[in-house]
Structure formats: C-alpha cells, structure tokens
Amino acid sequence: MERFAVIGLGRFGMRLARLLAEAGAEVIAVDRDRDLVEDVRDQVAVAVCMDAMDESALRAQGIDKVDVAVVGIGTGFEDAALTTSLLKTIGVPRVISRATSNTRARILTRIGADDIVNPERESADRWCHRLLAPTIMERLVLAEGFSLVQVAAPESFFEKTLKELAIRNRYEVNVVAVRRTIQETDDQGRTTTRQFIISVPMPDSVIKPGDVLLLIGSDDAIAAFPTD
Amino acid sequence: MERFAVIGLGRFGMRLARLLAEAGAEVIAVDRDRDLVEDVRDQVAVAVCMDAMDESALRAQGIDKVDVAVVGIGTGFEDAALTTSLLKTIGVPRVISRATSNTRARILTRIGADDIVNPERESADRWCHRLLAPTIMERLVLAEGFSLVQVAAPESFFEKTLKELAIRNRYEVNVVAVRRTIQETDDQGRTTTRQFIISVPMPDSVIKPGDVLLLIGSDDAIAAFPTD
C-alpha cells in the first residue's frame, strides 16, 4: 500500500486523510492548527502539528519518503505554492495541490505540482450538467463530445425489449448497462431493497419501471434522448 | 430552457452561474459583494447586489419565479440556512444548498433543501478513489459495491482480441466500451490526435496500445484487474 501525506486539514484535506486511512493506507496528516491535528490523531498513522514550509521538519517527519503528497491548503496561496515547491525539492514523486483559480493552477503546475485539485470548480462543472439535464443522474466524460450517462428509463420504454426499442438506431446511443432496483420480502414479511447491474444487456432484455439506463453516445445524441 | 438563480458568488457559485449562462440558460446571479456582482454582470441575464435574506427583495427580482435556486453560500451557515428556508417559502420548486459538513447538510435538508452540494467532500471522495487505484482514471459508482471505471489497457492485452482475453470469465468484469486515441497525419505532414469510442466492443475487437477500457464490475473484481 502506498504512503500518503496530506498537508492542510481543511474540509477537503481532513476528509481525504480519513478516507485514505480508513481504506488501510499509511497517512501522515499535517496542519498548523493543533485542534485539527487532534481531531484526526486517532484515525491516521501520524498526525503532526507543524509548519509545512519548514524543509527540515518535513524530512524529520519522513514526508520525503511518501509516495504521494496532497497539499490541501485552500486559503493562503503563498503557503500552498511554497509547500508544493518544497515537496518536489525533497523528492516526493507525486504532489497534488489544491488551486482555487486557473491562474493559480498554472503557477502550481509550473512549480512542479503533478496534479491539481479544485473542488469548487469540479463541483460546479458537475452540477451544471445535472441542472441542465435533470434526467441525467451522472455523467462521465469519455472523450471530447462523448459521454456516459445514467438516465431513468422513460415510461414509454417499460416492458419493451431492447430489440423492440431499437435504441441504437433510433437515438444513436448504446445501452451498456441497466441498473435495476428490486424489492424482496422475506418469510417474516420484511422488505429489503437491492440494486443490481445488468452489465451485458441482451436484445431480449426487458426494461422495467424504475430501471436506470447507462448510455454511451455523443453529447448531442444524449441531449436528444427521450425523457417522457 | 429553465430559469436559475445562483445566490452567493464564491468560487463555486460564480463558476456555476457562468457555465449555466454560457449554456444558454437564464441566470439571476446574486451576492452581497458588489465587486463579485460586477464581475459577472455581462455574462448573465441579471446580476443583483442584494441581501438574499430579504423576502421582498427576492420577490422584486423575480427569484420566486425561477425553476431552480442554488444557494452557494459557503461561509456563514446562518445565511445559507435562512436563504434556503426563504426560497422554499416564496415557492421555488427546487432549492440546492451548499453544506460544509454532514450536520449542516441534515439541517438544510430539514429546512427544505431539495439537494445538497458539498464540493470539498465530493472532491475528497473522488480523489481517494483515484489515489488508491492510480491506474483507474475515473470511477462512477453504479450501485453499492459496483462501479464503472476507466483503466489503461495493460500491456499484456495488446494486439489480442476480447475473445482471446476472455476478460469476463477471467476477471469477472465486463468491457462496455473502449476509448482509442489515434494520430492522423494529413498530406501537409501535420499530425492531429483524435479520440473515439468503441461503444459496442465485439469478441473480435483487438486491444491496441494506448487503449482505455471502460469496465463494469464489483469493486473487488475491479481491484483485482491486472495493471501489468
């Protein structure tokens, strides 16, 4: 398992440090704020209250030996930039830095950041897609102009087979999987809900009410897909 | 096209307002900070400097008539909560509010928020997946324990057909699409790069170096998928 340093325990860094540690990774969590460091102490391998712009302190904590360092500092661009630069200087192979604007992202990349995180930007991009196409539950951009989306099956599809619907010819999209939610009642009358994935839909697969279709297609074709 | 109000023009709200307007939607952008309002004035239908906790001002600007209001206020939970409540009171059908913690998300939902945005949390979740499985380029959670991921085709797959590889039987995942990057040189010797999607891979489809595979499977099966 790789070793990680997470520097800056704001909302982004704190959650990331916890998630990585929960998944079994060795995490060194660093912040200047003693309270934040205390909050995460029991959940990560090492929690240190220190100034991440102090090269010898970084080395003393073994941060030069991690595989990936994430600089989650969201406020104080100078701190984020200096820390990024220092982490590359001491030999961290992969440094991911949080930027709050495109200009800052460019500067961090020039300083040596291998990847940029911009939570607000990423989130706004995703929500824009969701709001403009409310029937689309999630979108994964596959290539320019091509996406995979999850769409609630329109009512006009219910109880028809994929062959009858001729989705590929009619709408120029491909159904690559179907997510179905089923309710099961056991012999004590308890109802449980279970979701499963039909990951190779066949021509004779029947669409049921509540099904979610996973479609691949051009963004234009997806925009024209029926929503009832 | 639906009408949107974006209240709070921080990094998240500002980007969202611009993206929605660029896509042709009618956007009312609201902030208390005159500079932020000026920044977006030329890009949206209406930009207003006002206190979003003033019911009559909201109505005067027609915010009671929008289809969706997004409360992007990230600092000042009281403001976010009051604005959310007020928007529901004046009859906005869908209100999406930004929360910076789970507790706040619960409160906003009880007040009437129809959806919650938490950019830092969403981003940390995605980055955790990416960091733990660096060969996985992107992941879409389809159901509990089931995902769709994009993975670089391992070298051992190159020049083999899907039938030869027997991916489904060997690795318990399905290849639902392949992304291929091709370089084309025109008669003037200019090289362009183009990506396309093979959205119905056939048994005799051959995997090429540089291909990206889109796999669906259980999270365990995906974790065990070869990376060379």
Image (cartoon, coloured by chain):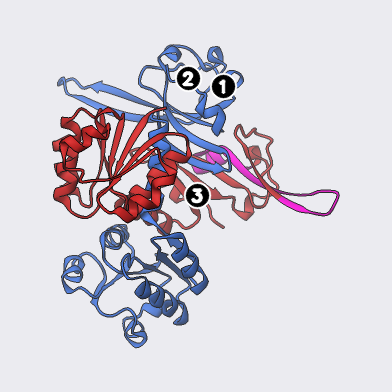
Chain colours: A red, B blue
Q: Which residue is mark 1?
A: B171
Residue A48, x across and y down, in percent: 30, 44
Whether pointer 3 and pointer 2 mark residues with C-beta atoms closer than 8 Å, the reply is no
Q: Quadrant of the N terminus of chain B?
A: bottom left
Label 3 secondary element: loop
- Whether residue B20 is situated above or below residue B32 in the rendered picture: above
Viewer-nearest residue: B51 or B205: B51
**Does residue A125 show up?**
no
Chain under numbered label 3: A
**Amino acid type, mark 3:** Phe
Q: Is residue B134 above or below residue B23?
A: above
| Type of amino acid at the residue the image marks with label 2 | Pro
- Mark 2 neighbour class, 10 Å CA radius: few under 14, some 14 to 19, many 20 or more: some
Nearer to us: label 3 or label 2 = 2
Q: Subunit of mark 1?
A: B
The answer to whether A46 is drawn above or below residue B63 in the figure is above
Disc 1 is placed on an element classified as: helix
Q: Residue at x 67, y 50 (%)?
A: A158
Closest to the observer, B9 or B16? B9
Q: CA distance from mark 2 to mark 1?
A: 9 Å
Q: Position of residue A148 (x, y in %)?
A: 46, 41
According to the picture, the residue beneath numbered tag 2 turns out to be B226
Residue nearest the viewer, comparing A31 with A192? A31
Label 3 crowd (10 A; few <14 / some 14-19 / many >=20) = some
Magenta span of residues:
A165-192
Q: Disc 1 residue type?
A: Tyr
Work out whether mark 2 precedes mark 1 in sequence or the reverse, and give the earlier one. Answer: 1
